[in-house]
């Protein structure tokens, strides 16, 4: 079309020149000006029309499918043509990459833009583009809340970010919205927020709202908790040999045990409450999108609490809390008998429902630990709106504790200490896991090496999202996601 426009201009100007060479110079001059004005108007209209069609074509296409060439067209359209070579040619920025760019990416290497006005204007243009394509951001697993703190993020955080290997310390800017609360209901754009992060391999600096499952760490945590269970079984055999003689050391005074008569079937009911909590937790774990991280945290916490329990059981032997317990020391004479007893306790998970009866393991209650930590994990990793599930979980937890005391299997102090330690460790662990300023600090690696190892690549809070982990049936994938 440009060729025909130029050809028309030449023809009209030629005609005007012929008329100017004639006697009627005034008429020729007027015609010359009129023709040139008309042709220029047509040319400008044609150019605007072509530009409008191009703009419409670019805007109607999905940004997440753009190539680097389409990104260069968008940059030129927005007035940033001088950065086409840097972004599109040198760094091969395509549509998904463009949607994840923020002001921090523009300022820092490898882009390293230095003109403040261009940085701000380009950041605002990127923010507008991200707001116009929120659905595509969510499809990519990226939320809008943290993209570009200066362009509308809730608040900016600045701090030193460390990788798991302790290398590569640098200042990062990241958009943060919301506080830690796994049970709080969240909108679609809040589910995955922008979190700046240095991966242990050094390959990525920002994992925008993505949580790596790191299955190998989950396997390590599972091995850890199983070894702790085995060590706990060994310590229980040792403390059984050291249990105080009931005739010399009668049960200690206890307000609850002295006031409430013993219920013989209560301890079995406590374990039944625990089994129901286990089934509920397994269902939540199966359907949760971040099941690997949740299982890793559960194994880490249970293993650590039971390791502490081994210390408290071994250093102090309390007298038997009830006369109904037939406990006597030195039941296992040779080493092989002790090993067999350890294997029996280990394989039966220390449950009387599995035929395991123990003595001496009083400070503190392992049954209370399991009941409480399962309750907290169920309520933390399900939405707050699931009132029925939360109520059932708490009722099972509290009734399980009551049944333990009603069976006179533990002193009240055993149950209280178990509940307190378990809840504090759960809250401390999750608070630290969502406090990035401390999560990658040197102090965390020194004082909490296991926590630092398991959580160093977890990028922000674990939000409650669910999906069906199997390929079928189709109705379940449609219902759950």
Image (cartoon, rainbow, N blue to C red):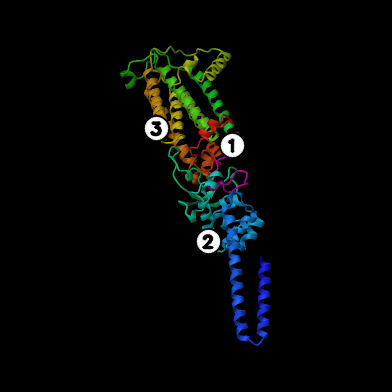
Q: Residue furthest bottom?
A: 23
Give me the C-alpha separation between circle 3 and circle 1.
31 Å
**Local crowd size for mark 3, using a 10 Å CA cut-off: few (<14), some (14–19), many (≥20):** few
Q: Which residue is mark 3?
A: 387
Q: The magenta stretch spans which residues?
A: 194-212
Which one is closest to the eye, mark 3 or mark 1? 3
Q: Position of residue 364 (x, y in %)?
A: 43, 25
145 inside magenta stretch: no
Q: In what element is the residue under mark 1? A: loop
Q: In what element is the residue under mark 2? A: helix
> In the picture provided, is 120 more to the left or to the right than 259?
right
Which of the numbered marks, if any, corresponds to residue 32? Answer: none
N-terminal of the pair, mark 1 or mark 2, is 2
Q: Quadrant of residue 263?
A: top left
Q: Are marks 3 and 2 in contact (CB under 8 Å)?
A: no
Q: In the image, what residue occupies the spot 54% across and 20% down?
A: 346
Q: Which residue is mark 2?
A: 121
In this rendering, is residue 173 above or below 25?
above
Q: Position of residue 422 (x, y in %)?
A: 44, 31
Quadrant showing the N terminus: bottom right
The front one of 410 and 148 is 148
205 inside magenta stretch: yes
In this rendering, is residue 92 above or below 285?
below
Q: Which residue is mark 1?
A: 214
**Local crowd size for mark 2, using a 10 Å CA cut-off: few (<14), some (14–19), many (≥20):** some
Q: In the image, what residue occupies the spot 52% across and 32% down?
A: 287
Q: Position of residue 78 (x, y in %)?
A: 56, 61
Residue 420 seen: yes
């Amino acid at each position: 079309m440009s060729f025909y426009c130029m050809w028309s201009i030449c023809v009209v100007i030629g005609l005007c020149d012929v008329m100017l060479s004639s006697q009627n110079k005034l008429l020729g001059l007027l015609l010359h000006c009129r023709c040139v004005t008309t042709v220029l108007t047509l040319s400008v209209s044609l150019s605007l029309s072509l530009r409008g069609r191009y703009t419409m074509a670019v805007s109607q296409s999905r940004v997440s499918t753009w190539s680097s060439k389409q990104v260069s067209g968008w940059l030129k359209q927005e007035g940033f043509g001088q950065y086409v070579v840097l972004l599109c040619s040198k760094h091969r920025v395509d549509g998904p990459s463009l949607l994840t760019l923020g002001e921090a990416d523009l300022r820092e290497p490898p882009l390293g833009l230095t003109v403040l006005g261009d940085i701000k204007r380009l950041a605002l243009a990127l923010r507008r583009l991200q707001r116009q394509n929120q659905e595509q951001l969510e499809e990519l697993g990226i939320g809008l809340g943290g993209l570009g703190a200066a362009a509308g993020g809730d608040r900016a955080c600045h701090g030193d970010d460390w990788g798991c290997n302790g290398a590569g310390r640098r200042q990062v800017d990241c958009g943060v919205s919301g506080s830690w609360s796994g049970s709080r209901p969240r909108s679609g754009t809040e589910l995955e927020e922008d979190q700046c992060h240095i991966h242990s391999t050094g390959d990525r600096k920002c994992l925008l709202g993505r949580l790596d499952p790191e299955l190998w760490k989950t396997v390590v945590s599972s091995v850890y908790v199983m070894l702790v269970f085995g060590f706990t079984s060994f310590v229980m055999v040792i403390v059984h040999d050291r249990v105080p003689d009931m005739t010399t050391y009668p049960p200690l005074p206890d307000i609850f045990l002295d006031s409430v008569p013993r219920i013989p079937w209560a301890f079995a009911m406590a374990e039944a409450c625990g089994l129901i909590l286990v089934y509920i937790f397994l269902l939540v774990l199966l359907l949760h999108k971040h099941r690997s991280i949740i299982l890793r945290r559960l194994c880490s916490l249970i293993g650590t609490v039971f390791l502490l329990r081994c210390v408290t059981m071994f250093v102090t032997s309390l007298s038997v809390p009830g006369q109904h317990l037939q406990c006597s020391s030195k039941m296992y004479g040779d080493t092989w008998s002790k090993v067999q007893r350890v294997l029996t306790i280990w394989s039966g998970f220390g449950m009387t429902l599995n035929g395991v009866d123990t003595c001496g393991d009083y400070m503190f209650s392992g049954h209370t630990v399991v009941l409480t930590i399962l309750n907290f994990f169920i309520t933390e990793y399900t939405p707050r709106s699931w009132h029925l599930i939360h109520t059932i979980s708490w009722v099972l937890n509290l009734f399980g504790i009551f049944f333990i005391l009603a069976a006179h299997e533990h002193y009240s102090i055993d149950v209280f200490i178990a509940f307190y330690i378990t809840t504090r460790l759960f809250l401390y662990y999750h608070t630290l896991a969502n406090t990035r300023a401390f999560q990658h600090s040197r102090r965390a690696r020194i004082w909490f090496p296991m926590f630092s190892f398991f959580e160093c690549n977890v990028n922000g809070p674990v939000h409650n999202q669910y999906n069906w982990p199997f390929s079928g049936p189709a109705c379940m994938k449609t219902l759950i996601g």
